[in-house]
Image (cartoon, helix red, strand yellow):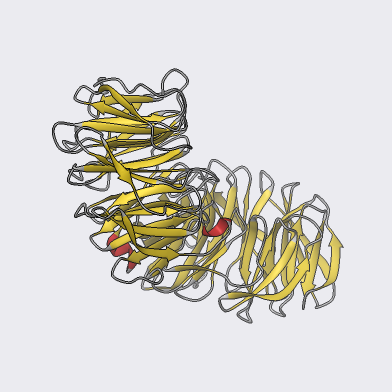
Amino acid sequence: MSFTQSALYTANPATARGVSTKLAASKEKIVYTNGRAVFVRAQRCITNPGLGVAYTGHTHNTTVARISPTGYYCASADVTGTVRVWDTVGEDQTLKGSYKVIGGRINDLEWDGESKRIIAVGDGREKFGHAFMFDTGTTTGEIIGHSKTINAVAIRHQRPFRAATAADDNLIVFHQGVPYKYDKTIKTHTKFVQDLRFSPSGDHFASVGSDGKVFLYEGKAGDVLGEFEEGHKGTAYAVGWSPDSKAISTSSADGTVKLWDIETRKATTTYTLGSGLESQQVGNVWSAPDTIVSLSFTGELNVFDRRTAEKPVKVLYGPQKAVTSAAPTSSSTFMVGTADGRILSYDAAGEAKPLGGQGHTNLVAAITKAESGKVYSAGFDDRLREVEGEKFTAASAPTGSQPKSIAAASDGTVFVVGAADSVRAVRDNQAVAEVKVKGNPSAVSASGSFVAVGTEDQKVRLFDWDGSALKEIVLLEGNKGVVSALAFSPDGSKLAAGDSSGKIVLYDAKEHKAITSRWSFHSARIHSLAWTSDSLHCASGSLDTHIYVWSVEKPVKNIAIKNAVSGGVNAVFWLGESEGGKGKVVGAGAEGSVKVWEVKFHQ
């Protein structure tokens, strides 16, 4: 077997209440962070969402990332004060250097115009900022003058180099360089200064703050040129420059994005996205001459064309938290559930959209599709919900306890396994049966009238469902840990049972005996199992970050997609039919992105 990654659908940026989220752009690429990953989304990702790139070299949550002016390297930072510089050219993402620069969270970093030096700022215990060479880590000056956390840093890309920093002490500090040294303190804002940026020409820089005000400064000397007329009615979190240095964009908690003319210092366009927390705009960047991307608090990337003055020309959606469950809905579409209770539907082109209607309010534990075409989901809000088309229906039923796994029988009954020691059968939003199961149920799968229930005592119990009651047929033994995932093959002849030790036992579902126990290469809990349409191969996703594809005919043969999803694989499934010795396997999990691999099977 062999495999190649064919698509990566990125997560959307992480946000935090009351905090500016730094977006960056380079050569029509948008760069941002979420969890431990850094995502690069090219301008062409707007029309082809699968062309995303993820860097997963950090061991702690990332905070900001920026590509060097040359485009060859990316510097990304995390909550521990570490900056990693890595290669953006080629697929290896080779690490150029890793530097511990301050003693706490890094809020922002910036490259100089020569792609040689970096300044990183944030919430350090001994200092709030550090300037260093990207290839050696050698110090190139001093970032001083602030008494509180620094929120942003900007560097003039032309010589003579200048740097400006903005902080929670309501101050901007102007530095001369190189080496960088304190020049003066600028007192324009009356509240936290959230962001500042130099123009591409280096002639000016602009700042925004929690007072809603926007100021313009001269680039070489740092002189205050004035305040923009009629600022925002809420905290202004981000400022970005047009490539021609003639305009800026600002994003605010008042739910607006404003475009400003530099000469007149007046707003030329105001985009209003709504009111309330979900409409707060917490980051922005110019990704092309006429394209501005602004980030909503809820993670949506709103794409504006400055030639149109009404609304976003496109909204880019994606998971903002870990993907906790997923299921295919057709041969080319699928849905994913996330840790914050959202379900996103991906169309054939790979574009994600959140479902309409009343959804879950907490983590989505499981998604399954019934033969009728309806999709069911269960969440930690202890509700089983029904999805039809692109929205939740009004139908929902209590799960009785916090759900772990669900499965749909051929008659439309949905079986729910939760924290209680029973399996609940739900049909037409009513609990029609409930059966106590020894050993505490932990996973469930259904095929025709057969229902398999995995338990914490390392066993699988096979039941027959007659439409009103579950009757236990046989007890299957062979697993070495809590049975955490179950999957019947599409033809109903086989049952795969994965457990917390990383072992998978393949059973003959009709003969009630083990076929093989050699599927044992995982080193941690199996989270998900999925069969190809021809019932000849099974994919497994595990907490160990790997995906394996197993062969029924050749049990000792497998394909290992190592480090498939950083932080662990929570969901794995196949898209479309497996034809001509090929198939498409999809994996998602803690990273928040969704990845697709083309797999060639052994002939």
Residue 405: where, in percent of width, then height? 68, 59
Residue 184 relative to residue 466: left or right: left
Residue 576 appears in which quarter of the rendering? bottom left
Residue 340 appears in which quarter of the rendering? bottom right
Asked if residue 394 shows in the view, the reply is yes
Asked if residue 554 shows in the view, the reply is no
- In the image shown, does 78 or 450 lie closer to the viewer? 78
| Residue that protrudes farthest toward the left in the picture | 159
Residue at the location (24% across, 23% down)? Answer: 180
Q: Is residue 176 above or below residue 516?
A: above
Which quadrant of the figure contains the C terminus? Answer: bottom left
Residue 51: where, in percent of width, then height? 32, 60
Residue at the location (45% across, 24% down)? Answer: 124
Which quadrant of the figure contains the N terminus? Answer: bottom left
Residue 127: where, in percent of width, then height? 41, 20
| Residue that protrudes farthest toward the top in the picture | 126
Residue 393 relative to residue 171: left or right: right
Q: Is residue 301 above or below residue 393?
A: above
Total marks shown come to: 0
Residue at the location (27% across, 27% down)? Answer: 175
Q: Is residue 449 above or below residue 531?
A: below
